[in-house]
Amino acid sequence: MQRVAFLVVGCVVGWLLAMTVGQGEPGPIGPAPREEGAAARASEATERLADAGRDPMDASSPPERVDVGSNRGPAEIDESFGIVILGHCRADDGERVDSCTLRFRDPDDAQRQLRADVRGDHGYAVTGLRPGDWEVFATAKGFANFESEIHVTEDHVQRFDFELTRTHSIGVRIETTDGTLLHEALREKGLSPIEVLAIGTPTRPPERLPMHSLRSTQLGCGVWYSASVMRRMSAPMPEDVSGVLELFTAPPVYVSAILGHVVLATELVDEHRDSVRLVVPVDDILDALATVRLQVVDAETAEPVVASVELSADRLGGGTTKTGDDGCAVLERQPIGMLELRASAKGYFSVHQRFRIEPGPQDLGTIRIGRSVVVRGRVVGPDDSARSGMVFIEDLERRSFPQALNSSFMSATDPNGEFELRAGRGRFLIRAMNPQRTEFGHALIDTTQPFEEPVKLTIRPTVGVKVESEREHVVDFPLLTVMDEQRVPVWTAYVRSARTTANLPAGFYDYVIHEQTRVVGSGRIVVRDGERPSIRVP
């Protein structure tokens, strides 16, 4: 009898996969459905859609759920086989996407993922899902990366269709008034570390964009690939361009040349074309650069320290400078925007501190640098057993305005969960997570006061907190900061898309939402196992 059950289930799955080419990673086959089979109910659902005047496999705005039907009640769902979902991916112009990879991820367990491949006209099918929320990610050549969320019910067979947005690549030539490519003109003037890039926006951008610590290539409704990056990728590229802008939206779109947060030139692209030309005088670049003054001193004695200093943006800086015997330095022709100052000296803990740099002269004042100390700790689970993973340390004294947490300093634990990190003087946040990023913990230490070593970090299972935005953000990314009950920041993110997930252990948290330095929202959430709270971002 068991053999017959296996055969019947095999027939049902075979029918589903005959309709579709992609398949997930199914678990072991379990008991068989009743005789009429899930296929019959799926066929009935198809007929209902056809009667309603719709193509049964049409995709619409993502994600759309269609009740395919099941011959099982909720109590009869096979625990080992799971739920079957199937469907199609379609382009925003209505054509079917014949090659696409889908990933379905449990928001509470990043390691719990299923994959399905779309090949040809047959769509996809994936088995093994359980009822609840699932994050969906789709990638396809020539389309923008897709993210969404679906809610899987207890029906044994369900259908979800997804709509992908076609990308349009356009070559961008950024040149000077005499027709020279701008990056070549900057190289001739010794300004090769200064990078001017292109972004696309659905509306004309202001002269100054909001500052943030995201990479500049993540701005706008597209992705920028400079000519040097394209050459390293051995990717085809039009001749005599500064780079290629891969746009995620159809024209009309505004293409702009930017330096940091300053918009230098803008052109409207109101129809599909292969290239666009932006003219930027070299003098405009020189006027937009910054001259920065600072002094580095010992945090305890206030004595000047000879240190190496650099301002960095997108891993590109204006060059390293040594301070004088008085600890002072002047950094000329520096990039602008939200930059990271790096200061290092022998025997001291290196400074990584963000500043908001505007064009022209700017004085950063006194940078206090503390002697380096070794912090030893151990990561354990809720049962006090050793856990391996990654550990991050952040100097909270350096956070002078709203900004994302900085992961510049990190270390891996040994098999016993033990780690060593270096710190300076002040309050430091230490965060730890397991390799799967499904367990998290944190601790706060003050190196100016005695503290117990080894520092014990208890990591606990996380719950996926929904972060829902009212709209997609192109350049004005709100910053969400989640804090523990002591108001210590434990999770931050710039909100770009309509859906984001914050993975936090059970507990009470406060949160605040900033647009630049202005508070636009705040509140409190309670995270409990088995529940998914949400945070709304304006």
Image (spheres, rainbow, N blue to C red):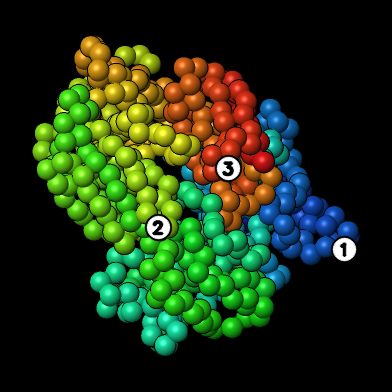
Q: Earlier in the sequence, mark 1 or mark 3?
A: 1
Q: Quadrant of the C terminus?
A: top right
Vertical placement of residue 284 versus 338, above or below: below
Query: What label does residue 360 carry, if any?
Result: 2
Query: How far apart, in angstroms, are the residues tagged by discs 1 and 2?
Result: 63 Å
Query: How far apart, in angstroms, are the residues tagged by discs 1 and 3?
Result: 46 Å
Query: What label does residue 53 carry, if any?
Result: 1
Of the two numbered discs 2 and 3 in the rendering, the one whose residue sits closer to the viewer: 2
Classify 10 Å Cα crowding around label 3: few (below 14), some (14-19), many (20 and above). some
Report the side of 406 relative to 53 (left or right). left
Residue 322 x, y percent position in the rendering: 16, 50
Q: Quadrant of the N terminus?
A: top right
Classify 10 Å Cα crowding around label 1: few (below 14), some (14-19), many (20 and above). few
Q: Earlier in the sequence, mark 2 or mark 3?
A: 2
Residue that carries the numbered disc 3 in the rendered image = 515
Query: How far apart, in angstroms, are the residues tagged by discs 2 and 3?
Result: 24 Å
Residue 150 x, y percent position in the rendering: 65, 44
Residue 235 x, y percent position in the rendering: 38, 76
Q: In which quarter of the image is residue 62?
A: bottom right
